[in-house]
C-alpha cells in the first residue's frame, strides 16, 4: 500500500484509515481522495480535513469521511477513500 506523491516540494504519504483517525485526533491534517483517482491529478485535488478548523468544531473523523464519501465517491472515481498525510507530520 506504499503510495506517495509530491506537490510543490511537499511529500504526501498514504496511510490507512485507522492511522488517519489517530492523526486526525492529534490535530494533524488528513487529505482524502477517491480510490480510483491518480495523484497528482489535474482534475481533482485531495480534500484536507483537520480537527481544529472552524467548520470542524465538534465534528468527528468519521463524520468527515461519510460526508466526503457521499458527495465525492461514485462508480467512475471509486467508492473507497485513500488517506494521505504530509511526511513531516507522520
Image (cartoon, rainbow, N blue to C red):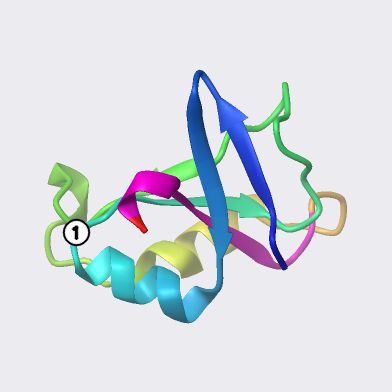
Q: Residue at point 77% right, 45% down?
A: 37
Depth order, front residue of 80/20: 20
Question: In the rendered view, would you say 48 is above or below 90?
Answer: above
Q: Residue at point 27% right, 52% down?
A: 50
User: Is residue 44 rendered to the left or right of residue 13?
Assistant: right
User: What is the tally of numbered marks visible in this picture?
Assistant: 1
In the rendered image, residue 83 lying in the magenta stretch gets the answer yes
Depth order, front residue of 80/41: 41
In the rendered image, residue 7 lying in the magenta stretch gets the answer no
Question: In the rendered view, would you say 14 is above or below 86?
Answer: below
Q: Which residue is mark 1?
A: 27
Q: Residue at point 52% right, 37% down?
A: 11
Q: State the SS at label 1.
A: loop
Q: Position of residue 67 (x, y in %)?
A: 47, 61
Q: Residue at point 31% right, 75% down?
A: 22
* Residue 62 shows in the view: no
In this view, the residue farthest toward the right is: 76
* Residue 21 shows in the view: yes
Q: Classify mark 1: residues with Cα within 10 Å, few (<14), some (14-19) or many (20+).
A: few
Q: Position of residue 15 (x, y in %)?
A: 54, 66
The range drawn in magenta is 78-89
Q: Position of residue 2 (x, y in %)?
A: 69, 62
User: Is residue 43 rendered to the left or right of residue 70?
Assistant: right
Q: Position of residue 80 (x, y in %)?
A: 70, 67
Dividing the image into 4 quarters, which one contains the C terminus?
Answer: bottom left
Query: On the image, which quarter does residue 30 sit in?
Result: bottom left
Dividing the image into 4 quarters, which one contains the N terminus?
Answer: bottom right
Question: In the rendered view, would you say 47 is above or below 6?
Answer: below
Depth order, front residue of 57/50: 50
Amino acid at each position: 500500500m506504499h503510495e506517495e506523491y509530491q506537490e510543490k516540494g511537499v511529500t504526501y504519504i498514504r496511510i490507512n484509515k485507522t492511522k488517519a483517525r489517530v492523526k486526525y485526533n492529534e490535530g494533524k491534517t488528513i487529505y482524502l481522495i477517491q480510490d480510483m483517482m491518480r495523484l497528482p491529478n489535474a482534475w481533482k485535488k485531495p480534500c484536507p480535513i483537520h480537527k481544529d478548523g472552524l467548520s470542524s468544531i465538534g465534528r468527528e473523523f468519521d463524520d468527515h469521511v461519510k460526508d466526503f464519501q457521499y458527495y465525492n465517491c461514485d462508480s467512475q472515481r471509486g467508492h473507497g477513500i485513500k488517506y494521505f498525510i504530509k511526511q513531516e507530520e507522520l
